[in-house]
Amino acid sequence: MLLKTLISPLISSTFHHKSLHFRLFSSTERIKVLRKVYSPLMVHKEGSQEWTKLIKSGKVWENYFHPFEWRAQDYDFQAKHIDFLKAIDDLKVSSKISSVDILRKLTVSFTEQSCAIEGNTLGLEETQKVWNLLKNRFNLDDFLKNQKMPLPAPSFLSVKPENEVIEIRNHLLATYFLYNTLYELEREIDFEDIKKIHRILLKDTRIERTELKEGYKHVGEFRKLEVGAYGFVNTVYPFSMEVPALMERFIQFRDESKNSGLHPLIIASRILSTFLHVHPFIDGNGRVGRSIMALYLIRHGYPPVVYRSFTRNEYISTIFLAQAEKDSIPLYSLVTKTIFDILTSYQV
């Protein structure tokens, strides 16, 4: 019964990675994968004390996908590309501008690209116009201190579709929150910080309006509903009952990664793919995950990831490969090359 709640609407996906072809899959295929992932749960009666304890522990999903473990391939990638990683670090040291200032300069392009990944059609020029109006006409700190304060109406900011303008407006504010508030903290961000990023990103959106009708609180809270990975049969997001325990382990994984001996760019990449695999929110996970990654990077002296030669399918494929196939190499390659290009552009 519970497995059926994970079967989502299906969409076709046409891109390839080596011999792996992401394609349209059937309900039968999805159920087969889910039964494999959750077989340890099926020995218990649904709703029993043992069943409830096991699913709330998050261990069934975790023990299948092992998202919080470093693998031999991670260390192999670092060893193989150690000279390239050193070149990146040399560029970081010689940069004439700090990482946080790069994020400030890239606020518009970071926002435009992060939203474009989710299907937003506002381009750089329109996003820049929205940002100019926000920072020149309003006190952004007031909005962040009092989240009940109404934000500027989308019709005031742009003539583009209202939902897309809201998404851009919110992402610009969330990015400002990253470098103006969270960056200054003398501690790592916690659940409440992550939830606040989510509240900023989802303010006035359809999801926030829907929660008022349904009685569920979706914005700024971990999800109470099940979600599926469209078009990717082997990618399974955990049940909502598993999310709190898995997010605890996500924070632990992030904190313990500093002792892994791995390069910060490798760690940042896995922080992103792992957060997206847990998929703690009903919506907005991609934007929150990229924000968390950006904050981690600037705190370690690197710029945020803004892809230069960017295709949405390439980005999505690297994420799903890191999750379902446990192959993070394409993601590491994409991120390290991008950071190298950005740092190189700031050497002049």
Image: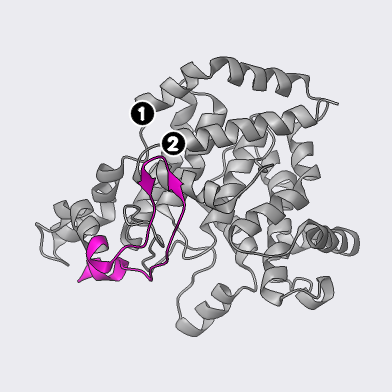
Residue 219 at what x, y percent from top left?
54, 67
Residue on which the image places disc 2: 328
Tag count in the figure? 2
- The answer to which of 348 and 296 lies nearer the viewer is 348
**In which quarter of the view is residue 106 placed?**
top right
Which residue: 24% across, 61% down? Answer: 29
Other residues around mark 1 within 10 Å, as few (<14) / some (14–19) / many (≥20): few
Image side of residue 145 versus residue 210, left or right: right
**Quadrant in which the C terminus is drawn:** top right
- Label 2, label 1: how many angstroms apart (C-alpha)? 10 Å
Is the residue under label 1 in contact with that under label 2 (CB below 8 Å)? yes
Q: Which residues are magenta?
A: 1-29
Residue 320 at what x, y percent from top left?
42, 48
Residue 139 seen by the camera: no
Q: From the viewer's perspective, is the residue at label 2 or at label 1 nearer?
A: 2
Looking at this view, name the residue that lies furthest to the right: 136
Q: Secondary structure at mark 2?
A: loop
Q: Secondary structure at mark 1?
A: loop
Which residue: 57% across, 79% down? Answer: 209
Relative to 61, is 118 above or below?
A: below
**In which quarter of the view is residue 47 placed?**
bottom left
Image side of residue 30 versus residue 135, left or right: left
Residue 153 at what x, y percent from top left?
78, 76
Residue 223 at what x, y percent from top left?
43, 64
Which residue: 49% across, 40% down? Answer: 271
Residue on which the image places disc 1: 71
The colour scheme used to paint the residues is one colour
Identify which amino acid the numbered label 2 is placed on: Ser
Sequence order check, earlier mark of 2 and 1: 1
